[in-house]
Amino acid sequence: MNLILKRLFFFSVCGIAFCIKAQNTIGILPNPVMIIETHQTTENMHLEDINDTSIINIHLYNPINEEKYPNIFLSNLGQAYKSLVFNDFRQIGYQPGFRQLDKYFIQSSEIKYFRTKTPFTELSYAFGQKLEQIFEGTHSQNIKKQNNIAFNYKRINSDGEFAQHKTSGNFVALNDWFSSKNGKYDLFAAFVLNNFKNQENGGWAIQDVFKDPAYKKDRAIIPVNLEDALNKCSQKNVHLKQYFNPFKNSGLDTLSPFDYKAPKLFTHSFTWQNQKMEYTDTEFDSTFYENYHYNLTFAQDNTKFNKISNAFSFLANSDSSSSFSFNYDAQIQYDFIQYQQYEFNNTVHQLILSGNFLSNFNTQKNKLQASAAISLTPNYMGNFEVMLNYGLFQKSDNPLNIVLKLQNASPTQKESFYTSNHFKWDLQLKKVFTNTIEANYLFKKWDFEIEFKNHLVKNYIFYGENQLPQQLDKLLVATQLYARKDFDWKLFHLSIKAIGQISNQKESVRLPSFWQKTTLYYQGGFIKGRLKAQMGFDLVYNTNYKANNYNPALMEFYVQNQEKIAFYPVLDVFFNIQIKRARVFFLSQHLTSGLGKGGYYVAPNYAMPDRSIKAGVVWQFFD
């Protein structure tokens, strides 16, 4: 431990010295406007400048960290995660049902496309004990004025604090944005490769670990339920989206198809997705699973998924200078899907119609958005989704948003039919109908936000104690209240977030009734303003509840009734610094480790890691 602290101190001092030295070089580079003229966008966003040098929350390096709603994960960076807030997220039509690692992957819909006059590079690296590290690098440059290429690489690796819990992942994205000289054609193209390997230990095999002094110094010697189990996921994705603007634009030297003032646009999207999930367990005498359907000595489950999609859409815009403006689009999408699992093969042809309408009226003070989608696939007829969103912007610029969402969605392939070495089922499940109403109010003058959500779910699907999908025959009602208040006093900043939630089906929905996070930090400038620093802490707490257990072969959380998990406040202390475009953080996690019973579990037999130290850096280059 002392050696680790010495190394961290040495590297931090070297890093700060290097940053202070480098800031003079960065400050005298010519053409400082190049930073302003570097832009980024996704397919569904307007261009925005790349000028993010904020050090707020840079210590939240884990991909599952959320600004608003919290998640828990199984003890090690890269392991399966679960939201602590109710959200029955679904998509209409055919869905395979494997979404347990999505937040770690590079998603084609979230890829950033760039326009920059000079090459742009952003590097980030965070590391901690037990070889925990996460690295991400992005490089972009314009080949020509109308053509930009970008490369993104991310790696996650961690040995973990406990036995048989190592994670390793490599994620690559290569993308291109081409625009014609006359501004009438844009092409977004991306290739994505995601590979992830997670060792699975099935949790600790003994009870009362925290009371046994033999395991206090070395958690890695604690016996686990699985000694040679592994989950692997590989995903390939090719995505193309074309924008056709047959009308002459306004003459503005625009960099984005969304900035066109032309009244109409046509788009075409093509996506090819290939995904393979594999679970292996070569342990011969394991009694962790009750059933062995294919092999008594080892498990080797494979699920393959292929999808080819083509979508055509039409977009139209009105005159934005009038007191009432609107735009709308209509889309038709065809999917060809192949799904394979042992001897089971399924081929699906899917057709989905969708549309959106957005209007601004009364001098831009009111906004109304409506969207709808319906499946025309024979086996998925009756699948639909409707969303209405009303926004009111008052004189004091306090936005009020009210959202109504109706959805009728079929169960996923995994929920309906599944076959593996340890589990088999063929269930006739009903469609899940969801009615959600949401109201959000932001009072900017007081830095106060409040949000209310109410979910009504008919035929809710969950994994029961037998680790199989089950469907409620009663209406599920889940209500949530979220509040955030920020306080500023001189150089001190305080942020308090709280979530309360209740449900009428507590035996099926296992979530804490209350979650709260307090962040307090001091921020000031040092070394004649060249160094901006932030020092503070995060304090997180949620109430006790019977947290769901986890099944590695299914990669699913399921209901258990044996243990109610007790929690205590978790304290993290951070120190963030920023010099020009370099941002560095130091983080001490779980300082309250040892309180109560000596630790606590995030899921039965899966403990939260003990006290640890992390550090990281984020740096942008414009040359």
Image (spheres, rainbow, N blue to C red):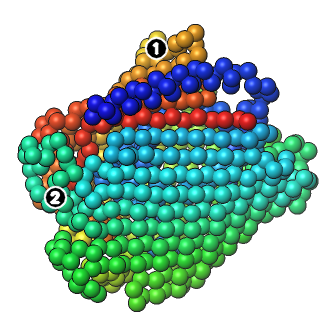
- Secondary structure type for disc 1: loop
Quarter of the picture holding the C terminus? top right
- CB contact under 8 Å: marks 2 and 1: no
Amino acid type of the residue that numbered disc 1 sits on in the rendered structure: Leu
Crowd around label 2: few <14 · some 14–19 · many ≥20 (10 Å): some
User: In terms of secondary structure, where does tag 2 sit?
Assistant: loop
Q: Quadrant of residue 606?
A: bottom left
The residue nearer to you, when weighing 52 against 427, is 52
Q: Is residue 135 above or below residue 242?
A: above
**Res 172 label:** none
Q: Amino acid at mark 2?
A: Pro
The residue under label 1 is 491
Q: Residues within 10 Å of mark 1 (few under 14, many from 20)?
A: few
Residue 201 locus on image (x, y percent):
25, 62
Q: Quadrant of residue 82?
A: bottom left
Q: Quadrant of the N terminus?
A: top left
Placement of 556 over or under 502, stated as above or below = below
In the displayed structure image, the side of residue 521 where residue 194 appears, left or right? right
Residue at which label 2 appears = 223
Residue 37 percent location from the top left of the image: 77, 35
Q: Please count the marks in the image.
A: 2
In-image side of 373 versus 285 (left or right): right
Whole-angstrom CA distance, mark 2 to mark 1, is: 48 Å
Residue 509, compared with residue 532, is above or below; it is: below
Q: Position of residue 244 (x, y in %)?
A: 82, 61
Q: Identify the residue at horizontal 30%, vertical 37% (top origin).
A: 612
Q: Is residue 223 left or right of 481 when viewed as pictured?
A: left
Residue at the location (53% across, 57% down)?
171
Kindly give the residue lying farthest to the top in the view shown: 528
